[in-house]
Image (cartoon, rainbow, N blue to C red):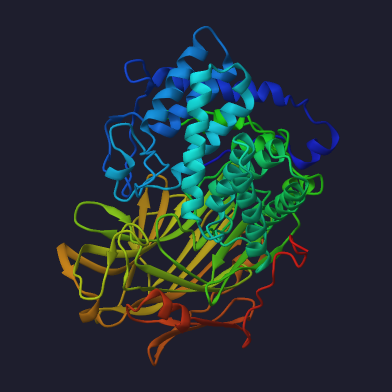
Amino acid sequence: MSKIVGPTVASWRTSRAPWSAAEYDRTLLRAALSEGDRCWDPEANLLRVEAPYNPIHTHIKGGLAHPTRNSLQYALLLLERGGAGDAERAHDVILRIAELQDRSVESATYGIWGYYAVETAAEMDPADWNWADFLGIQLLLVHARHGDHLPPAVLREIRESVRHAAASIVRRNVPMSYTNVAVMGTFVTLAAGGLLDDGKLFAYGKDRMVRLCEAIDSTGSFTEFNSPSYWGVVLQTLTLIREHVRDEEVLVLNDRLHDRLWLHFLARWHPPTRQLSGPMARCYSNDLGVPPFLVKAVRGVLGTPDVHPVRGELSVGVDSCVDYRVPDWALPRLLEPDGEREHRELFAQNPSPETGTTWLDAVTTLGSVNHQDTWLQRRPLFGHWVRPDGTAGHLHVHLLKDDGAEDFDFASGVISTVQSGPHVAWLTGFACPAGDRHHHLDVIRPGDRFRARSLRLVVDLIGAPPVPETSAVDGAVDLDLGTARLAFRLAGGSFGGRGPTVRLVPRADGMRIEVVLFESASPAELDWATLGDTFAAGSLSLVPSATGRAREQVPNPEVDSVGNCAEVRWTTPQGRRLTLSGGRSAVSREEHATLYSATLDGAAPPSPRLSESRLVP
């Protein structure tokens, strides 16, 4: 849980401590280089780190390994520090990274790198083509900031690596709905076109910028919506375009896109907890805090949390090389709550609308997306509350599978919602074909059997005061969170002919509500075709304790089977009538999307665009 530190709104208005961007940059640089120096392996001319567990792409699941991206970041930061021997070490890293790039035009992994020196891109399963974008950015930063002082051999290898990485990006030509990679590749091809004096490559980057803006214009928002890490990636890349690309037409579009990005962020920014609320398309951590790029952008007015890089992760040091800037109109909204408000937004047409709703008040915030899979990076129902001690508590709804060896987020789930204020009706089911750990890389197909000891929809309340483990009475859980109250109701459901049950489980970091869909003493082989109905449905509310809402009776939702759908009906404590329908058996994601429907007081909830102004006139 993150401590809410830094100036209050009132103190910021009257007297703000002097902010030194240069000193903060030095802090970031020192922190990153301390970790980089600790991990340096002079025999390999690369960093050596404990590889984090990664269920996809790489076969390296742990142990010491030599990462390519982190090592290249270290080279950049060594040049930034400029101490005795730093330049020589940086040159060695750059030359080693150049050796590790696949430069064979005939290769399927042309232009990219493996995650680690010991494993080539071709040996990965599958390779991560985003490494052309991520490493391309680092190489371009090295050249932009230190190219005038690099030896000819190093300059030559940088140019060659950039040329091959950019060619890989052009060959791949990702759809503009892949937001973060679409933006990164746009910068790489624009900057590489300028560096290499390649007019065709620069024209591709410029056209890509137009296509990106047109894709965002189609809904007014971002397909990879409200993703904290990728919001930071996009912010960084748009800032780099502003700093390092010299084309007036590109810069006009870039400025408009930069404003749209901040508008998107502020719609779900919750000043009382200083957290970004849900829903989220991609997320790695429930406690988001105030990352360095946001500290820099707002010139320290949100405080300056301590920076502690781990495992040779040096991205915070790279942030010292980027001149982030918040638009003047956005700064007050970061600090001052707007009172109670509800934000609705259309994210994408896939082809059915993908929409989100977020409720924000002085204590709590809760957000949901109408329809989303349950891959571990999703946050389909997510929020926070201010705890009595001033820290932020976190609410995270996800689907867990125990395969007999460990629990992990099961990507084959589907969560559908409809929301009014701080109240959400939810329905969870399963898709087939769909992924196991990843949403499309390890697919369970019709007829496949898969192994499971349990399947549980869980509501993690991180920071909740502990209560004894107990079974919920008639599927109902009411928790006093100190400053807020949570009301959870299970309306019903079925999994292979058995109804789900609810239990409350204390955890070291808070409390967990578990909706147990399937559980066995030992792992079982399951087949979607023989299970029949596989769904559960209910409601969830998160409200401040000090308001009248906390004392209102929470009605129980109802669920029925209607044809091949399950239908949830619920009247919120405020009298709003929510109806939600979705698939009740394991069908394809596409069919789940067509079966989804929702009404609020008998009509479809509105899904307004984030902005009616177009990026491309």
Residue 180 visible in rendering: yes
Q: Is residue 580 above or below residue 215?
A: below
Measuring 57% from the left and 22% from the top, which residue is drawn there?
29
Residue drawn at 46 percent across, 24 percent down? 94
Q: Position of residue 67 (x, y in %)?
A: 38, 32
Between residue 120 and residue 306, name the one nearer to us: 120
Give 508 or 161, whichever is nearer the viewer. Answer: 161
Location of residue 103 by image quarter: top left
Extreme residue in the bottom direction: 563
**Left or right of 536 in this view: 84:** right
**Residue 579 in view in this figure:** no
> Is 18 placed above or below 5 here?
above
Task: Assign the C terminus to one quadrant of the image.
Answer: bottom right
What residue is at 37 percent from the left and 49 percent from the top?
Answer: 507
- Viewer-side residue, 53 vs 44: 44
Relative image position of residue 158 (x, y in whole percent) = 51, 29
- Front residue of this view, candidates 565 and 134: 134
Q: Position of residue 380 (x, y in %)?
A: 49, 63
Q: Is residue 151 above or below residue 304?
A: above
Image mark count? 0
Left/right placement of residue 124 relative to residue 98 reads left
Q: Position of residue 442 (x, y in %)?
A: 29, 60
**Looking at the image, residue 283 lies above or below residue 614:** above
- Where on the picture, by quarter, is residue 501? bottom left
- Residue placed farthest to the top in the image? 84
